[in-house]
Image (tube, helix red, strand yellow):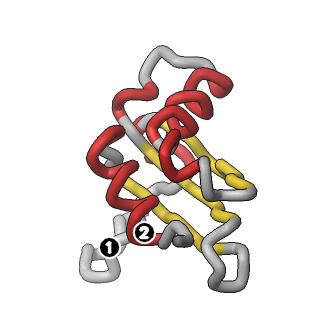
């Protein structure tokens, strides 16, 4: 039986407790290839390779059926905030110059 996007999300949510998670099925629906963008406090103090290993370890059972896993982002919340600043609040008054 193929791995579903929901299974990948559920596993990563339970094991890495991400503050942001985006999982895309890039296999055309057959569940053999996924793309993951994940932000977790558990990545603090870890190098990128260690973060990728954490994701792969969390998905160990699913990886038995997944052909390809692309981890496009594995960031800490602070890194995520720097890369994705909040949009300006359109209701705040313009600043006086």
Q: Is residue 90 left or right of residue 53?
A: left
| Image position, residue 80 (x, y; %) | 48, 46
Q: Quadrant of residue 52?
A: top right
Q: Mark 1 — residue?
A: 89
Residue 88, horizontal then vertical, whole percent: 40, 69
Q: Secondary structure at mark 1?
A: loop
Q: Which residue is mark 2?
A: 87
Mark 1 closeness class: few <14, some 14–19, many ≥20 residues within 10 Å: few
The answer to whether the residue labelled 1 contacts the one labelled 2, judged by CB atoms less than 8 Å apart, is yes
**Residue drawn at (43%, 58%) of the image:** 21
Find residue 41 and report its image quarter.
top left
User: As displayed, is residue 95 above or below residue 76?
Assistant: below
> What x and y, as percent, mark residue 71?
65, 49
Is residue 37 found left or right of 66 in the rendered image? left
Where residue 17 sits: x, y (%)? 29, 43
At x 39%, y 39%, the residue is 40
């Amino acid at each position: 039986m193929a791995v579903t996007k929901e299974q990948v999300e559920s596993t990563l949510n339970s094991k890495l407790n991400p503050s942001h998670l985006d999982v895309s099925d890039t296999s055309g629906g057959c569940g053999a290839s996924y793309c993951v963008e994940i932000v977790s406090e558990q990545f603090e103090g870890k190098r990128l390779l260690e973060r990728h290993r954490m994701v792969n370890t969390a998905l160990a059972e699913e990886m038995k059926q997944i052909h390809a896993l692309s981890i496009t982002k594995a960031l800490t919340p602070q890194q995520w905030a720097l890369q994705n600043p909040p949009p300006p609040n359109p209701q705040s008054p313009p600043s006086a110059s």
